[in-house]
Amino acid sequence: MRRGKEIAQGSHASADFLVEQIRRKLEKDPNGDVPIKLSAKERTWILEGMAKVCLRVDSEAELLEYHKKAQGSGLNSHLIRDSGRTEFQGRPTFTACAIGPDIIAKIDGITGELVPY
């Protein structure tokens, strides 16, 4: 992926826990208010600076593997699928995954051996 595309996909992933809630509410009532319930971990993450760590995988299959491991460990994991309109020869492709917000040690238990990007 181009560098700009990588940044955009990571941004989508890091905000998906919020966007997912907003989208569900708007689908039910497009003109209504959009109250959001945040968990204690989500509130803490937002109030304490929204830390993010970007890590690299070498394939879509590896990305899906980490996503499944995170979910299997009880962590929230948000997988982003690009439509393929500007890259990937028109083929929808999983491009990014955000794990958390949660306790750092729990996330490191899944991703600790990955190399920072």
Image (tube, rainbow, N blue to C red):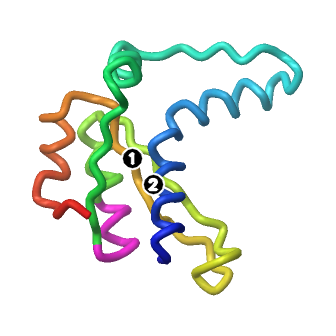
- Residue in view at x 34 percent, y 27 percent: 49
Using the image as rendered, state which of residue 22 and residue 4 is in the foreground. 4
Q: Are marks 2 and 1 in contact (CB under 8 Å)?
A: yes
In this image, 5 relative to 47: left or right?
right
Label drawn at residue 30: none
Rendering coords of residue 2 (x, y %):
49, 76
Q: Residue furthest right?
A: 31
From this view, report whether residue 90 is shown above or below residue 75. Answer: below
Q: Counting other residues with Cα less than 10 Å from the Cα at mark 1, is it few (<14), some (14-19), or many (20 or more)?
A: many
Using the image as rendered, state which of residue 16 and residue 4 is in the foreground. 4
* Quadrant position of the C terminus in the picture: bottom left
For residue 18, what is the image quadrant?
A: top right
First in sequence, mark 2 or 1: give its number: 2
Q: Counting other residues with Cα less than 10 Å from the Cα at mark 2, is it few (<14), some (14-19), or many (20 or more)?
A: many
Residue at image mark 2: 10
From this view, report whether residue 40 is shown above or below residue 78. Answer: above
Looking at numbered disc 1 in the image, what kind of residue is underneath it?
Ala
Start and end of the magenta stretch?
58-65
In this image, 35 relative to 65: left or right?
right
Rendering coords of residue 25 (x, y %):
72, 24
Secondary structure beneath label 1? strand
In this image, 69 relative to 114: left or right?
right
Rendering coords of residue 24 (x, y %):
69, 30
Residue at image mark 1: 98
Q: Is residue 77 magenta?
A: no
Q: Is residue 60 magenta?
A: yes
From this view, report whether residue 53 is shown above or below residue 21. Answer: below
From this view, report whether residue 80 is shown above or below residue 39. Answer: below
The answer for how far apart the CA atoms under marks 2 and 1 are is 8 Å
Secondary structure mostly seen in magenta is: helix
- Residue in view at x 66 percent, y 13 percent: 35
